[in-house]
Image: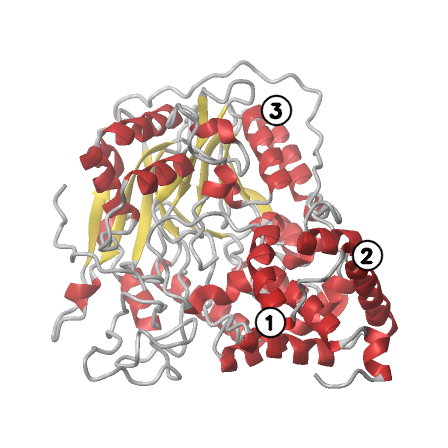
Amino acid sequence: MPRHGVSPGQGHPGCGRETESDRSRGSPRLRLLWTGLALALALPDSLVLWAPAGAHPLPAQSHPARFGRLVPQLRNAFGWWNLTCPVCKGLFTAIDFGLKKEPGVAWVGSMATKLCKLLKIAPPTVCQSAVQLFEDDMVEVWTRSVLSPSEACGLLLGSTCGHWDIFSSWNISLPAVPKPSPQPPKPPAPGAPVSRILFLTDLHWDHDYLEGTDPDCENPLCCRQDSGLPPASRPGAGYWGEYSKCDLPLRTLESLLSGLGPAGPFDMVYWTGDIPAHNVWHQSRQDQLRALTTVTALVKKFLGPVPVYPAVGNHESTPVNGFPPPFIEGNYSSSWLYEAMAKAWESWLPAETLHTLRIGGFYALSPRPGLRLISLNMNFCSRENFWLLINSTDPAGQLQWLVGELQAAEDRGDKVHIIGHIPPGHCLKSWSWNYYRIIARYENTLAGQFFGHTHVDEFEVFYDEETLSRPLSVAFLAPSATTYIGLNPGYRVYQIDGNYPGSSHVVLDHETYILNLTQANEPGATPHWQRLYRARETYGLPNALPAAWHDLVYRMRGDTQLFQTFWFLYHKGHPPSEPCGMPCRLTTLCAQLSARSDSPALCRHLVPDGSLPDVQSLRPRPPFC
């Protein structure tokens, strides 16, 4: 397809003697063992950012898998090859006893910092700052969690020593009301009203972005005041942004919002979070609230009376991904964040939504007759939310609440849109499976699902539970505003069956807009936001219903040129220089069929010989989650 003036892609930058005091908490090696587990559970997904990101989809990294990669390094560093199962359980029993007797945040932090530096998990200054940021929460989670010595040693030494059971299976309850017969939406009549929804996600404003600084520094985030200058052989960060591990200056977000005219007008805005930058090792609550209020004010300034409906991203909190369930009270709770959101967004949201927003960061409202909008806090499904180690069973009762909202909408004959940040296919297994069941049950009521988080342009198809062969819903994953990592800035516009009696409210088409950074950063140039593509036109879709996206995946399997078009648009017009061969293509296509995190059957027709591993190991996971 024509590249619309978009620049060619580049590669992407994801012992001393034991004392009595030591024995009360375990030996130094024991402390390092514990902190190794803590780092494996909390830090790698946040701090692996300093490593250049591959452009291809990355395999899933569950907590056990991440820790499994760290174990050999720990063993090599500390000579733990002879650690036996009984000794391991004894050591973790001592840890539990020691932490209950004396929380010991200081020694945990000290040992974690040493380990982070020793294993080169991050640059030394990042190690120091990150551990200081995470240590209080991690010790609190550990002391509250149900992680037993047997489970910890099962992670460390394998299933013969214990079983990882924290994220065990659970079920939500569906009403006894029989499911109505499936009724696929009918195309709207010619001339029927069409609504335009602006979709913003992953803005990632960097307050410290500085033109001319090194875009390839050693830290997880560059193009900043602390990044230093680049070598003379390489240019510094561009004025409007950079194709590297960099976020956006405020002026680029202002340019985006002030340049929306050609893409509008808009009936409403869905905004699915991730407002702060990726400097996750050095953030305070004050920093996060500054980002929330600054960017919210900017959106209000340029969108005026257009209603905006936000969702909570995983970067809104600090430490990143840290969203305790509502039963965690006091200073560790998320009330500081939810209260600020309620205040910042009260002009957009009806008063009745603020109750659940303040409790758990989710809400429901009716933006127009016949349509119910549900904003989910997807951090309660997140593999990286370390607070779920305490209890991951339907945190905050959000999924049971969702069922109630959907049943009430079905009873009224309303249609429903769901918005959220993390896509359901990237969630914890049981959460994802339960969500899949809910979508299948209420397929007639659900008109659209809209998510972000991955920064790239993709989708996830849902199928019937019985055969996993009938497409019944699709979750659209819109690309990010930020450049992180190696992308053009962008945003999405959805065309929706409009506001009239009997509307299906389904997605009719969508368009993606970008800022070509190569052109924008030329001397004397001004930023020009342009439409990159329109989905139905580019992919030859008969409509934008689930079956059309299912068929597109299978067409791309056999049509190399069509897939390369998708790959180009997947990266917002700035693909990596390395080609996406057959394994990469099948992995990418399988992910589009996989709105559930653990179903190997979803890709069976893509690779009839069964040569692909299960879906969870194929799940593309960019390193910025």
Give neighbour class at mark 1: few <14, some 14-19, many 20+ (Cα, 10 Å).
few
Residue lying at 34% horizontally and 30% vertically, measured from the top left: 549
Residue 336 drawn above or below residue 379: below
Q: Are marks 1 and 2 in contact (CB under 8 Å)?
A: no
Residue topped by disc 2: 86
Q: Are marks 3 and 1 in contact (CB under 8 Å)?
A: no
Q: CA distance from mark 1 to mark 2?
A: 21 Å
* Quadrant in the rendering for residue 227: bottom left
Q: Is residue 395 left or right of residue 307?
A: right
Of mark 3 and mark 1, the one earlier in the sequence is 1
Residue topped by disc 3: 411
Residue lying at 47% horizontally and 65% vertically, measured from the top left: 48
Q: Mark 3 or mark 1, which is nearer to you?
A: 1
Seen from the viewer's position, the closer of residues 277 and 596 is: 596
* Residue 590 shows in the view: yes
Seen from the viewer's position, the closer of residues 372 and 540 is: 540
